[in-house]
Amino acid sequence: MIGTDVQHAANLLKAGQLVAIPTETVYGLAANAFDDTAVQAIYKAKGRPQFNPLIIHTNGLHRIEEWGMQVPEKALALANAFSPGPISFVIPKSNQISDLVTAGHEYVAVRIPNHPLCLDLLSRLDFPLAAPSANKSGCISPTTAQHVADQFGEEIPYILEGGPCTIGLESSIVSFANKQIQLLRLGGLAKEKIEAVLNCKLSIEHIQNNENPLSPGLLSRHYAPTTPLYLESSVSPTSLGEPTKIACIRFQQYHPAIPKENQFILSEMGSLDEAAQHLFMAMRLADAGNFNCILAEVFPPHGLGLAINDRLKRAAVAS
Ligand code: TXA
Ligand code: MG
C-alpha cells in the first residue's frame, strides 16, 4: 500500500517489517538495521547477493556517535558541509552494527538523507534504517513511490509516499576505510564539491575500470533496462536499424536522425542537475515503449554529468 502516514511506517519498522521510504536521491527499501531478521528480509526481497553491504540511514550525526561509531575528521567536514544530503560515508563500524549489514566488512556506510518525511520518520526511531535502493537487484533505482509499487506490489507492507525524488541519482559514496579517502560511487553530490571541502583531488579511474574491491555492489553492468542501450560514442544510429524503433536519451537537443516523439530530453535549459533528476524516469519510459533499442548521449563530464555517464555506461550493452 502507498500512503503518507509516517507513524504507521514507524510502527511497521519497529515491528521488524520492511517499508519503502522516500529520500532525495532514490527510494529505499528499509528495515531496522539492529534486527538481523528484518535485514535478512531486505536481501531476500531484492534478490540481493549477501556479499553486497547495505547503507544505514539516520537523522543526525550525533546518533551515529551514540551508536558507538567515530566519524573521522574529514568525514565530519564533509558531513558539516553536505549532510543531510546525497552523500554516504564509509566509516569504522561499531559492535552494534551486525555483519549482515556490512557483509562482514569492518566498515559501514552511513547516510543522513535530506527528505522531510524521511527525516521525520528517522526521528521517531531509536535505531538506524538499513536501506538499499528499492528495486530488485540489478534493476533501475526507483524515483517515485509508484516505481516501487510496480516492482514489489504486495511484497512490501507499506510504501511511504514522498513525491518524486529531487536528486534522482543514488548518493555519492566516500570511503574512509584504512585511513584512505576514496570515492566509491559517483552520485548525487558532484565530485568537485566533495573535492573542494576535502581540498584534494579524488581519482575515479578505479570506478571507470570497475576495480572496486571496496564496494562489491558496484558491478559493471547494473541499472539496466531490458531494452538494449547503446552510447552514441560507441555506435552510429544507422547501424541500429529502423529509426522509428530507436528511443533516444539526450541532454538538451533532439538527435537529428531519430523521430522527435521517440526522444527524451533530460533538460531543455541544459542543467545537469535537472538532467540527473529525470534520467531514471527516462530510462524506464524508453524501456516501456515499443523500441528495439535505446541510444543515449554521452553527457558533459563534469558536475552530475560524471554520475549520469557512469549510470549510462553500466546500463549499456558491452560494445
Ligand atoms: O542514495 C542512496 O545511497 C540510496 C538511498 C536509498 O539512500 N541507497 C542506495 O543503496 O543506493 P544501494 O544498496 O542500492 O547501494 C549502496 C552501495 C552498494 O554498491 C554497496 O556495495 C555500497 O553502497 N556499500 C554499502 N555499504 C558499504 C560498505 N560498508 N563498504 C563499501 N561499500 C558499501
Ligand atoms: Mg541500488
Image: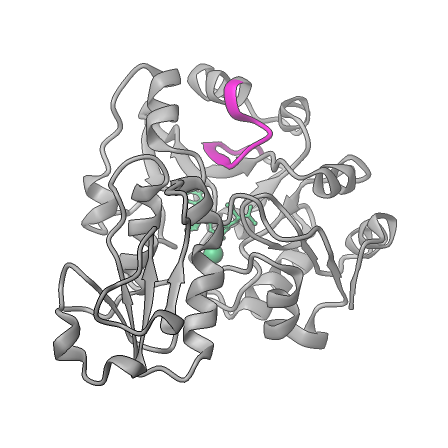
Image coordinates for residue 149, horizontal then vertical, percent: 66, 70
| In the depicted structure, whether residue 36 falls above or below residue 146 | above
- Tell me if residue 306 is in the magenta stretch: no
Image coordinates for residue 148, horizontal then vertical, percent: 62, 66
Please tell me in which quadrant of the rendered image residue 270 appears: top left
- Tell me if residue 89 is in the magenta stretch: yes
Please tell me in which quadrant of the rendered image residue 179 appears: top left
* Side of 241 relative to 116 (left or right): left
Image coordinates for residue 262, horizontal then vertical, percent: 37, 73
Quarter of the rendering occupied by the C terminus: bottom left
Instruction: Look at the image and give the residue range highlighted in magenta.
Output: 81-94
| In the depicted structure, whether residue 206 falls above or below residue 248 | above
* Side of 40 relative to 87 (left or right): right
Q: Residue at x 66, y 50 (%)?
A: 22
Residue 169 visible in this rendered orientation of the protein = no
Image coordinates for residue 293, horizontal then vertical, percent: 29, 77
Q: Residue at x 43, y 48 (%)?
A: 276
Q: Residue at x 61, y 48 (%)?
A: 130
Quarter of the rendering occupied by the N terminus: bottom right
| In the depicted structure, whether residue 293 falls above or below residue 43 | below
Closer to the camera, 152 or 143?
Answer: 143
Closer to the camera, 55 or 6?
Answer: 6
Residue 31 visible in this rendered orientation of the protein = yes
